Amino acid sequence: MSVFRLGLAVASAALVAVSAPVLAQTPGDAAVYQQPPQPIADILDAEPTPLASLGPDRQRLALFGRANLPPISELAEPSLRLAGYRINPRNNGPANGRVAWLTSITFKDVASGAEVAAALPAGSRFISPTWSPDGGKVAILKDAADGLELWVVDARTGAASVLTGAVVNAAAGAGVEWAPDSRSILFRAVPAGRSAAPAPKAAPTGPIVEQTGGSARPVRTYQDLLGSPADERLFDHYFTAQPTLASLDGRLTPVGEPGIVLGASISPDGRYILQTRVKRPYSYATPAGLFPTDIVVTDLTGRVVHRVADLPLRDNIPPPFDAVATGPRSVSWRADAPATLVWAEAQDGGDPRGQAEVRDRVFMQAAPFSAAPMRLIDLPERYAGVSWGRDDTAIVYSRWFNTRHETRFLVDPSNPGEGRVIVERNYQDRYNDPGTPLTEPNAAGRPVMTFAGEGRTILMDGSGATRQGEYPFLARMNLDTGERTELWRSAPGSYETIVGLLDDDGRRFVSRRETQVAPPNMVIRDLDAAEPQSLTTFPDPAPQLAGVTRQTITYSRADGVQLSGTLYLPAGYDAARDGPLPLVMWAYPAEFTDAAVAGQVVDTDNRFVRPGGSSHLFLLTQGYAVLDDPSMPIVGVDGAEPNDTYIEQLSASAQAAVDAVVGMGVADRNRIAVGGHSYGAFMTANLLAHTDLFRAGIARSGAYNRTLTPFGFQAEQRTYWEATDTYAEMSPFTYANRINEPILLIHGEADDNSGTFPVQSERFYAALKGTGATARYVVLPHEAHGYRARESVGHTLWEMVDWLDRHVKTAPAAGQP
């Protein structure tokens, strides 16, 4: 549900709040963080529910305590934005707004229920917990005053020990990986003797110059790119890392030479390391993942034994979403073999606009890498991954965005070259999703498919979406016949997902179970027993919302497309007594190629829903009804581009939603607001510009001028020059003079999402102000695309409540003067 669409990120600046004359505050006034009204503040400060993970040995469940919303002072720590990354120079890890810190570990014995707490120092916080392949230990990266430390926690006793000082380099990601023998850990370290960081703002030695040679270089709107020689020096300093093996007795063994290592992975047999190393020249137009790159295999001393690829700068990828760079990509180890590389290469030049029978070819190459690569399979679509099983069984996935088509091929890696189609489908079709192979860690700790019965049957799990709701299932699929036999499905009225198996046949497993009134908890499900066995008793994190009611409503658009949404009503609401309420519609458009798929309805009555972060559902505590996630499908049929009729379809969907809630008697037509985040903010501005359905709007972290994203956006693959009229017509900036309803704009000052630069809101607000609209523009310091700090989240909710109270709740009801 959209309540959970929250990002984690950060940056820097000061809170700015400017407003139309209707408010007392004037542009330039100092602003302070406001607290949302109760009970919102209390709910925000409630302790988060722990996360759960079943160990590979199936004996213990790890419960990870989570930190609450961090203070703004934490997000205000210095951060650097380099080549698509944001890092904290204090600990050489991800910037604080991008970190969801964990605070504790409790191990629960599945058989007895006995618990043991990890003996971590008081006040510890950590990231990247990783089970050892034998299930006996968990590795973590613990925050320290001057860096990140590598620790290991014994799952049997809770004993915790530190393996390294604060030397872990997690700038490019944690990258903690156990060796298959569970006795050592591969990580990336800060190089020994690293000098002091270069000054971030040294005096320039000259202008910054970029030049193109005339060949096309269409690049999407990336954020946080390098922009100067000073940035390049900082990138070199913080991203240069030394691959290192840490043994459990504390010995550290460097692997080769330091370099800008964006990835390192041990082979399943523990003999080799696959490394991805970036090299110069860098680019100011792409993130580091597209810089010139060496992909190599080394031994454990760091000696290069095989070079997989020497990739150039990839700044010439065509705009369509099915376009890829040429050369090897998605290079990884085969999970079920000792040391076999797997990768894909485009056979159509990477450009989907040309005709080709084979789009991608998937290769394998086994150690010692002296033989030529073998062709595993040719694909008519783009490679989308593999589920590995054993020598004679794997499933290869391919997808094609333009048609939303997915194909799954059964292949025999011991006899490569061909595959048999076992699934073809529209991957947006929720009703007919057969599920995916259930994987579990093998002895080396790598995910492989779970075989059952006679060995030609695998276990599958899936979301089980139906008109009545999502009811996850576990099934067996015969690989020879394709026949599926359902073993278990979540019971009516409950939502239960598999956490991990407790046997090989899928008869016993740990699951996470919830109902509309019971919060999620872990249980042991035995298919031979009538009732599950409880493992945890986590309480309701927001009992203040227990009386809220909700129902899935369905209605039709004027063109016949079926639509739906989830209607929430405040606790204690009585339609006969209270009559129509002020209502907020909070939505997010989606593009489809099939009207029937776009109209699929999935009920949510079996889900336990509590808001978190800056969720719009908190408005239920303030007397508002909420229509959550009403369908806003943009459908392109028979090859038509969906966005060519975006405004017409969006307006028709909104009209149908308004008519539905007014017709039910729960909403007052004159007191309905619309809101959304990101692409939902874009939607909000367009609906205010092109309809008169809403009293006011709230647009958070949106993009409003599509000429600033000229090489595609959201699901639009065409460039601005290929679809100029569509870009202009879809941009609410073009029609700012038509917006005559109050609109609240909120944006994170350090938005890191592609395309939603803060300048989008800044310029849109200037247009609204210049054309006489009633608008308020709030900039949240240090916040990225999703808001993270407690002060920011609280203030956002205060702004939303205050705006709606001023412009919606107090508006005259329909039919009144």
Image (cartoon, rainbow, N blue to C red):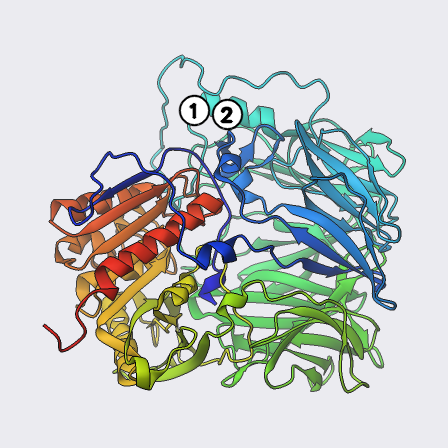
Q: Is residue 417 left or right of residue 360?
A: right
Q: Position of residue 483 (x, y in %)?
A: 69, 86
Position in image of residue 689 (x %, y %): 18, 61
Q: Position of residue 137 (x, y in %)?
A: 83, 50
Q: Nearer the viewer, residue 536 or 308?
A: 536
Left or right, 59 with respect to 28, comes to right
- The quadrant in which residue 657 appears is bottom left
Q: Nearer the viewer, residue 63 or 331?
A: 63
The amino acid marked with disc number 1 is Ser
Residue drawn 57% across the image and 49% down it: 68
Q: Against 762, is 733 above or below?
A: below
Q: Which mark is residue 283?
A: none
Q: Quadrant of residue 266?
A: top right
In the rendered view, tell whether residue 642 sits above or below residue 91. below
Q: Measure the C-alpha gap from mark 1 to mark 2.
A: 7 Å
- Looking at the image, is 539 positioned above or below residue 25? below
- Under circle 1, the secondary element is loop
The crowding category of the residue bearing disc 2, from other C-alpha atoms within 10 Å (few below 14, some 14 to 19, many at least 20), is some
Left-right relation of 155 to 437: right
Amino acid found under the numbered disc labelled 2:
Glu
Count of numbered circles on the image: 2
Q: Are marks 1 and 2 in contact (CB under 8 Å)?
A: yes
Image x and y of residue 259, in percent:
66, 29
Whether residue 785 appears in this view of the structure is: no
| Image quadrant in which the C terminus is located | bottom left
Could you say which disc has been placed on residue 232 in the image? 2
Q: Which residue is disc 1 drawn over?
A: 228
* Residue visible at 48% across and 80% down in the picture: 602
**In the displayed image of the protein, which residue is found farthest to the left?**
817
Residue at x-position 77% and y-position 64%: 440
